[in-house]
Image: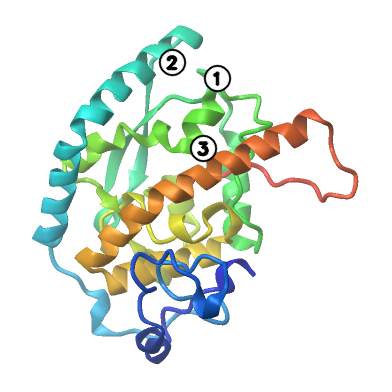
Amino acid sequence: MVNGGLNPSDDGRWRRGRLAAGLGLGAASGSRTPTPVLAPLRSPLVEEPEQDASWHVGEVPWGKRILDITLILLASPLWIPLFLVVAAFIKLVSPGPAFFTQERVGYREKRFRMFKFRSMKVGADTATHRDHTAHLFKSDRPMEKMDHVDSRLIPFAWILRSTGIDELPQLINVCLGEMSLVGPRPCTTYGYEVMLPWHKRRFSVLPGLTGLWQVNGKNRTTFQQMINYDIAYARRWSLWLDIKIILRTMPVLFGQVREMIAKRRQAASGPNPSQPAAPAPTGY
């Protein structure tokens, strides 16, 4: 089981487990295994959690909004040049626009246009992905992307996607107040259609570029575990938790790059008959 699962309904265990010490980078009991940002519990939530008043939220906390804008401004000398370079690179290696927009479901189930750098060829088929997402949401399979073998990708897109650079234009959505730096990933409209009512508690906070799920396994976790993390974040949000998740994000991205390089090398050397068939890519 990835990260031991998470059960946000078990409040007693949450209080005793607490947030992981420091930045969540330490190891428990002398182990070298990194501790997740929120201490994992024994099993993932598989049933609807108990209702309580904490799910009813008001406006976006002002501290969260100030943190988002402050960090964007402070990092602007880094992300603005990178933004321009990546946009020019995409135009150079692939005919078509540098940006891609898609309708997503966000805060309080409102729909908005999410920005991304285009990492797929213009006109790439999405019907298979839609069907797979519906199946994935009902299965217990890890939500693993297969960028190392996806023929729909433009040249070097795997670098943009494994580093999260393709998500950089979503800083525009953050500035517009449609997203935050930290929160559950914006849901696709077809993913939203197959969600159960209690899954939609994840929409009680702004969607984000990074989040609790992303720094606790992401592509190695199932849809059910992702929902658990998203609801846990919505229920336990604090400014300090956002800061810890942001600081954890960069090491996680480095790990994703290393993992993607290893997968590409394995794909180049040929399939391993002892390995099960790989899952199709996801939209998260």
- Residue type for callout 3: Ser
Query: Residue sitting at 43 percent across and 54 percent down?
Result: 192
**Which sits earlier in the primary sequence, circle 3 or circle 2?**
2
**Helix, strand or loop status at disc 2:** helix
Where's residue 230, x and y in %?
39, 64
**Amino acid type of the residue tagged 1 in the rendering:** Ile
The answer to whether the residues at label 3 and label 1 have Cβ atoms under 8 Å apart is no
Sequence-wise first label, 2 or 1: 2
In this view, 1 is above or below 259: below
Q: Nearer the viewer, residue 130 or 235?
A: 235
Quadrant in the picture for the N terminus: bottom right
Q: Position of residue 232 (x, y in %)?
A: 37, 72
Residue denoted by label 2: 90
Q: Which residue is mark 1?
A: 154
Q: Is residue 220 visible?
A: yes
Q: Label 3: few (<14), some or many (≥20) within 10 Å?
A: many
Numbered tag placed on residue 162 in the rendering: 3
Image coords of residue 87 (percent x, y): 36, 17
